[in-house]
Image (cartoon, rainbow, N blue to C red):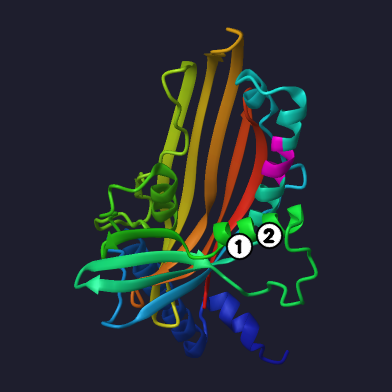
Amino acid sequence: MPFLFSEYCITFNCRPKSITMLKYLFFNLLFFVSALTFAQQDQSVLLRWKLKPGEVISYKTVMKNIDSANNFSMGNFLKSNGADSANSTEAEKMLKKLSGAMENNDYVTTLTENKPGLIDIIMHGSDEGKSTSADTLKSNSDQQRFKELMKQVTSGVMLRGQINEDGIITSFYLKSDQKNLIATLFELPGKPVKVGDSWPIDVNFISVDQNFVCDSSYKKNTVTVLAITNVNGDKVVKLKYDIEEYISAYVNSPFDGKKNNSVMKFTHQGIADFSLSQGRWLDYNCLLSMFSTGLMSNQTTERISLINN
């Protein structure tokens, strides 16, 4: 019977040296990669904005309504404040028209170094994609007046604030809606973090006055590190946003004394990638959803993205 190498190896439980060496190298490589991955995920990193003197970080800022079921109504609010049906209907049409026109605008947000350690943030309207066709509207028409109103509303500076290089908001004096934008788009933890760490950001989506009597509410506000990875030699931190605010309340109309029940809910959820070496967002995509019933009815979902210019 001819000699079979395979039978010999099985009988005496041996392996060719080359195969044994390959297995040895493979298991050592696997151990090294596993240890490196574990160490990388377990280490703490500090997210920090990095700008050179005179440098400008520019993002195309997209805030687009993507909810086809979008509806907006202030009819109950206007009527509760004494407006008749005809006037409330006309006012609501104008508000819807204004809201719709606002949704079709893109913005540009720039970050510049004000002084060492301090960063100025400015958002302004973008002319990209706007029509350059000749204006055929009559000078005194309602359409022309509305167009002029929209030009005033959407041009110029829409947002102005300031953070330090660690991403902490220094413009504490901003209105809530302005501070919310700064916080959701540019605030960083301000301390070393590792995979699994979570922290809140400085947002407050819902705000009511003394006329609202709250019967239930809750708030969740967390940004979490999902992963820290090496991408072409660049360390990238992946963050998850999970923010939710809810309130159920009622308000008594000052005109007819009727009780109006209201519910408001905001969520801000999404994923963002931050480059540690470059000190800026590589990718930022979140969804902001708003839902309310009662005096002001609203149901919208917006996609909010930062795109490198």
Magenta-highlighted stretch: main secondary structure?
A: helix
Tag 2's secondary structure?
A: helix
For the residues labelled 1 and 2, the Cα–Cα distance comes to 6 Å
Please determine whether, in this image, residue 249 is positioned above or below residue 130.
above
Amino acid at pointer 1 = Lys
Q: Looking at the rendering, in which quadrant would you find the N terminus?
A: bottom right
Amino acid at pointer 2 = Lys
Residue assigned mark 2:
147
Name the residue at 53% across, 77% down.
12
Label 1 Cα crowd, 10 Å radius (few <14 / some 14-19 / many 20+): few
Residue assigned mark 1:
151
Q: Say if the magenta span includes residue 137.
A: no
Q: Position of residue 272 (x, y in %)?
A: 48, 61
Count of picture labels: 2
Tag 1's secondary structure?
A: helix
Look at the image and give the residue range highlighted in magenta: 91-96
Q: Nearer the viewer, residue 118 or 47?
A: 118
Name the residue at 61% across, 15% down.
260
